[in-house]
Amino acid sequence: FIGEHARVLGEDMTAISRDHLKKLRQRIGFISSPDNLLFQDMSAKENLVLSLKYRDGEMAVVDEMLDVFNLRKVADLPVFKLADFQKSLVIAAREMAHRPAILLVDCNKINLTGESEQMVFDQILSLLKNFKTCCISSPRSLNHLKTYPGRHYKFQNKILTEVS
């Protein structure tokens, strides 16, 4: 926040038009609970295709994300048949397919623990580095994100703070 104005990606959020806000939203990814963010009766691949519907070269991006997140073997299964960590990978693939400038990660809503959580974050981190994406996370995610070079931020109690 700067003065009375909130700025996101250099845009004054208090003076932005609705159409421009939609374009800005496309540059922000959000990883949270798969149950709320995926169409359960659609396949993993269909969820990716739907999110990229109006993007040129969508199928090449879908194929890339299926490979990066090791989802090729389960790509045609309905989401409700996937394990929790696979659902989280589909969410991550869908959000990273847009190559967001900002990625919001809420680990508290992702039903993962231990090894499967680390696997999801390893994939996300590799893409964050390639896409030069800023990542803002819940405090629980910080353990994974500390290996990501640069500044680290956490969002807790409605306050965004830098973590050293």
Image: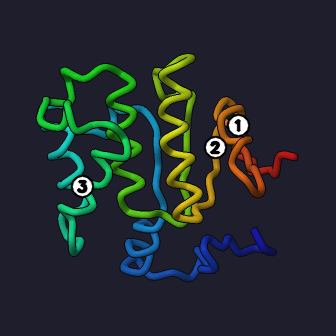
Query: Residue at 52% of width from left, 64% of height from top?
Result: 131
Q: Amino acid at mark 1?
A: Leu
Q: Nearer the viewer, mark 3 or mark 2?
A: 3
Q: Which residue is mark 1?
A: 142
Q: Position of residue 153 (x, y in %)?
A: 74, 50
Q: Amino acid at mark 3?
A: Val
Please say if the residues under marks 1 and 2 sit with CB atoms less than 8 Å apart: yes
Q: Which residue is mark 3?
A: 62
Q: Nearer the viewer, mark 3 or mark 1?
A: 3
| Mark 2 nearby-residue class (10 Å; few <14, some 14–19, many ≥20) | many
Query: Residue at 38% of width from left, 72% of height from top?
Result: 22
Q: Position of residue 72 (x, y in %)?
A: 22, 38
Quarter placement of the N terminus: bottom right
Judge from the rendering whether residue 161 lies leftward or rightward of residue 80; answer left or right: right
Judge from the rendering whether residue 24 lies leftward or rightward of residue 59; answer left or right: right
Please say if the residues under marks 3 and 1 sit with CB atoms less than 8 Å apart: no
| Mark 1 nearby-residue class (10 Å; few <14, some 14–19, many ≥20) | some
Q: Is residue 16 above or below residue 98?
A: below
Which of these two is toward me, 64 or 108? 64
Q: CA distance from mark 1 to mark 2?
A: 7 Å
Judge from the rendering whether residue 147 lies leftward or rightward of residue 34; answer left or right: right
Q: Is residue 19 above or below residue 145?
A: below
Q: Which residue is mark 2?
A: 137
Query: Residue at 61% of width from left, 70% of height from top?
Result: 8
Q: CA distance from mark 3 to mark 2?
A: 25 Å
Q: Position of residue 21 (x, y in %)?
A: 44, 74
Which of these two is toward me, 6 or 99? 99
Q: Amino acid at mark 2?
A: Ser
Q: Secondary structure at mark 1?
A: helix
| Mark 3 nearby-residue class (10 Å; few <14, some 14–19, many ≥20) | many
